[in-house]
Image (cartoon, helix red, strand yellow):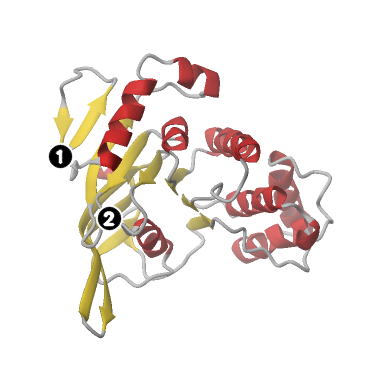
Amino acid sequence: MSIIIGSPPKSETLTDNRLFHSNDVMLDLKNLKKVYPTPKGDYVVLEDLNLQIRKEEFVTIIGHSGCGKTTMLSMIAGLNEISGGHISVLGKHIKGPGPDRGVIFQAPSLMPWMTALQNVLLGVNQVFPDATKAQRNDIAKYYLQKVGLEDAFYKRASDLSQGMQQRVGIARAFAIKPKVLLLDEPFGMLDSLTRGELQDILIEIWNKEKITAVMITHDVDEAIFLADRVVMMTSGPRAKIGDVLNVDFKRPRTRKSVLEHDDYYKYRKHLIDFLEH
């Protein structure tokens, strides 16, 4: 059951297979299933999972460890085979990885011997082969500047702090101009101060770019602060969408305005109650 809190009428409920107008849908997961064969028989991680995500929407995904959140995200990215159902981007079924989907992992996965600029250019060169070298450099530098790394273009990734490496990862993902941005707990390994700084950077760039974003997080406050909707997954095996919470805060947001909003603790209690159920 999907519950809208903070949007009139307060009592309105929607089922988790709510359908949006096809022209509004960027990402569509239909009857998604993931099965891993084991010596004791098939292990069903996800089953009958249905979710539609609109253009320019920011959706966060929460759920207990092992419920299949990362499996679902890797299937959207085209990095994990789909056992049943399908995933489409703008109505086109995905068949593997593609530049229409950018991914930011928990660990930045940079080439340590390359500079920050070279790491971003890896994707830019692939996606914009017809651009001049100067144009591709400009794209990479622009996004490195947006994440606060204008003084680190030529520093090797191995010489950067973990937080700075994740900034490179954010720049790299935005620089390829994807239709969908996928984030797998990108701030999970960072200290709380750095985490807050990068959340602000992420949402600032997203507000400008308006790329459809799907982010996994274990942090309830992070889920609320960033999202238009928070999707809650049931525990595995055979996990599916258990609940969807609409976050009715105006954008652009500040952390202060979110914390002071009348509905903030209502949202927070709803998510915690689901996770503790």
Q: Position of residue 75 (x, y in %)?
A: 37, 64
Q: Quadrant of residue 145?
A: top right
Decide which of 210, 12 is in the foreground and name it.
Answer: 12
Q: So how many labels did they put on this image?
A: 2
Secondary element type, mark 2:
strand
Placement of the C terminus among the 4 image quadrants: top left
Q: Amino acid at mark 1?
A: Thr
Dot 2 corresponds to which residue?
29
Position of the N terminus, as image quadrant, is top left
Q: Residue 113, image x and y in percent?
A: 78, 69
Q: CA distance from mark 2 to mark 1?
A: 15 Å
Crowding near pointer 2: few (<14 within 10 Å), some, many (20+)? many
Q: Specify the farthest residue to the bottom.
A: 39
Name the quadrant containing residue 224: top left
Nearest-to-viewer mark from 2 and 1: 1
Label 1, on which residue?
15
Q: Is residue 78 visible?
A: yes
